Amino acid sequence: MRRLLGENPHLKVLALTLTTLLYLFVVGERAAVRSFTLSVRVGHLPPETVVLNELPTIRVNARGSARAFARLDAEALRTVSIDIDDTSQARWEIRESDLGLPSSIAVESITPRWLDLEFDHLETRTLPVRTVVRGTPARGFEASAVTPTPSEILVSAPASYFPDFDAVFTDSVDISGADGPVDRTVGLAIPRPYVTFPDTDQIQVSIEVDAIVETRTLDGVPMLVSGPVAARCSLDVASISVTVTGPKTVVDELEPHEIFAAIECGPLVEQGAGVYTPEPSVKNLPATVRVVETRPSALRLTVSPAPDPTPPPGGSGGGAQ
């Protein structure tokens, strides 16, 4: 036995090699079934024409030898292209010839085989720009004016979009915590496929953020008479109501006892004793706050006569005898 195994070794190696090759050939020719998932690519569309609906993926089952499948280009099995020559046709069939498979591979099934395509043509129109603002300004402030530049732009989109597509919206501008003007350069939101902006897709947005103006009435504001001769002047009220307006954050903090109303008595005393109805002047208000109204608007002030400068008669006298 050992002698037989040792004789003609080169012939034995050759026989083993041929056997292996024969086995590989038989295995390579054995029929196999493969499944592929392909995306659809539409080509040769007329100018300014688009497909609106989403295209499905295609499932293909094919039969062939393992050798035939091994020779396939992997990239060729990722997409299937269909050329459009008539956009009035609504349904298109995926044919075996569209797959580009060699004749050694037979197609058993294509799912779905029919595609429903919705075509539309692109139009260009001029639409206004609308700014999207989010967030809340600082306490006591509000956005008073929003200005996009440019205020309108050219928009290219499928014609069927335009009945409901009457404005272009910007990306959002955040004004959280703002206490003054906000300026931003932002992009444009693309609401649906095939929407483009031929001229520009950048918008300069200016937002005015101003203090909120509030009007408030303060009751019980002290009423004072000032001047070196104030003792000769008397009022019929000790306090009044004052209506003021100004920034909300400032007006909200005001307290009646922190301000006061005054009348300068000196000019009235110079006019002589009598009853006058002067207007009070509110003091100690913040610079950003102004008076709208005082109630009563005119007070009743009495100026008493000046004291007699002649001293009263003094001493005693005697009568004639």
Image (tube, helix red, strand yellow):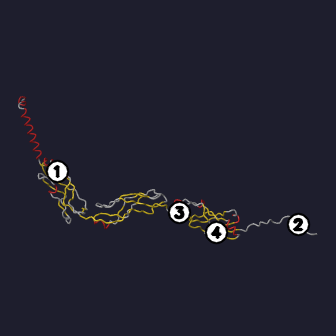
Q: SS at mark 3?
A: strand
Q: CA separation, marks 1 and 4?
A: 104 Å
Q: CA separation, marks 2 and 4?
A: 50 Å
Q: Which amino acid lies under the numbered mark 2 shown in the image of this protein?
A: Gly
Quadrant for residue 7, please give it. top left
Instruction: Name which of mark 2 and mark 4 comes first in the sequence.
Output: 4
Rendered location of residue 180, percent (x, y): 47, 58
Q: Which amino acid lies under the numbered mark 4 shown in the image of this protein?
A: Pro
Q: CA separation, marks 3 and 4?
A: 25 Å
Q: Which residue is mark 1?
A: 34
Instruction: Name which of mark 3 and mark 4 comes first in the sequence.
Output: 3
Foreground: disc 1 or disc 4: 4
Q: For the N terminus, give its image quadrant.
A: top left
Instruction: Name which of mark 1 and mark 2 comes first in the sequence.
Output: 1
Q: Which residue is mark 3?
A: 246
Q: CA separation, marks 3 and 1?
A: 79 Å
Q: Residue at x 12, y 50 (%)?
A: 64
Instruction: Name which of mark 1 and mark 4 comes first in the sequence.
Output: 1
Foreground: disc 3 or disc 1: 3
Q: CA separation, marks 2 and 3?
A: 72 Å
**Relative to 153, residue 38 above or below:** above
Quadrant for residue 262, please give it. bottom right
Rendered location of residue 123, percent (x, y): 28, 65
Name the disc covering residue 317, or none. Answer: 2
Q: Which amino acid lies under the numbered mark 3 shown in the image of this protein?
A: Gly
